[in-house]
Image (spheres, rainbow, N blue to C red):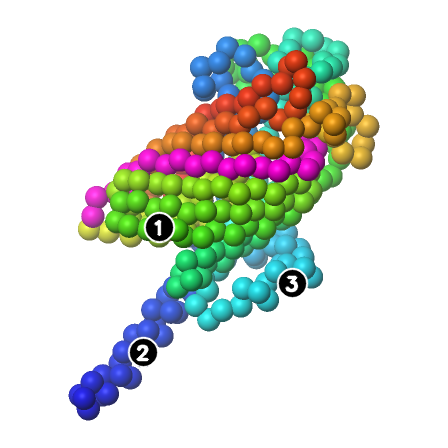
Amino acid sequence: MYRHLLLLPFLLAGVAVFAALVNDELYNSGWRLNTDNDLLTGQRTDRDYTGSLALTLSGKRVQQHPVSIDSWRGGIDRLLGFSPRRKSADLCQFHSQQYGMTLFTPDDIDSTGPVYGDRPYASLFFMSNSEFTVLPEKDIAYVSRLTVGFLGLDMAESVQGALHAITGSRLPNGWDNQISAGGEPTAMLTYAVQNNVYSAKNTQFKTEYEANAGFISDVNAGFSWRWGRIHSPWWGFNPYQSKYVQQSMPVFASNAAGKKNELFLWAGARLNLRIYNAFLQGQFRHSEVTVSSGDLQRLVAEYWMGGTMEFSRKYHASIFLRGSSDEFKGPKSRGLAWVGLTFSRAY
């Protein structure tokens, strides 16, 4: 017994060291590049959520960047009381920042005039900061995110025109009629909760709940699952965090040292109770084409499925299909589908 007591200080020291390692976020934990395009689904038409491009930076560094809104996000958290509820000795906090754009078009991209009764042209150029708080012992994690950007910038036409010129596809002609044409600032605040339901050697399953307020306002609930050769914790992979484009989330390395690289399939779904969508309804500035509140679909179902491969240690590549049910009512309403590609490097 006494010999066991003599070992106690060493055991406590080991626990302290482990806790310090778990809670010590890297200054630079990695980066992620992702792009979406509906043409990759094999469709002949270029419409709806037509594409995106986003770069995510991860680690403590994003809180210290000259251009960062993490202090704004943290201030809103404190104002709303979100941070104090998560105070815990065993928590781990991670941070990320994302720069990106999203583009939307109607079915008819040949017309130079307004296309009524269909999805409007819309674009968003944005920056977002996220804080991801994990409580491993309680199998729960929290997401806090602030996104700011501009709707309706003229560069949307230039960017899509350049992409279509490269791919040899038809050029869109109606960008003068996009939502908030000429530019308008916008923002969105996101809070989410993740619960680890089941984690085994080759399978992970978690449920997620989320609320958004801003250019998209909704509440949603769903699940995400992955299966295969997994060497990262249940919180280390987050395809659920998406509003069309995959949103800012920290980059995590797998612990595959001495083992085969990660290789897994994944899928998920959620149901959104949609309150407002600026990409359809417009914002404060006049928009030539909008979808009325009465024609907005309140319940929108989403799904996703894909595969991820780790290669050359700490590099990951993913390909996936995402889609949703129709977002507005009318004869031109339809479901959405697009393919995305993601490439990341963890440190």
Q: Residue at x 65, y 24 (%)?
A: 328
Q: Which segment is the magenta one?
A: 259-279
Q: Nearer the viewer, mark 2 or mark 3?
A: 3
Q: Which mark is residue 81?
A: 3
Res 16 → quadrant: bottom left
Q: Which residue is mark 1?
A: 198
Badges 1 and 3: C-beta atoms under 8 Å apart?
A: no
Going from the N terminus, do you reach mark 2 or mark 1 first? 2
- Percent across and percent down for residue 242 are 53, 38
Vertical relation: 187 (above or below) 94: above
Going from the N terminus, do you reach mark 2 or mark 3 first? 2
Vertical relation: 224 (above or below) 104: below
Query: For the residue labelled by badge 2, is the local secondary structure a helix, a strand or a loop?
Result: helix
Q: What amino acid type is highlighted by mark number 2?
A: Ala
Question: Label 2 vs label 3: CA separation?
Answer: 34 Å
Question: Label 2 vs label 1: CA separation?
Answer: 31 Å
Query: For the residue labelled by badge 3, is the local secondary structure a helix, a strand or a loop?
Result: loop
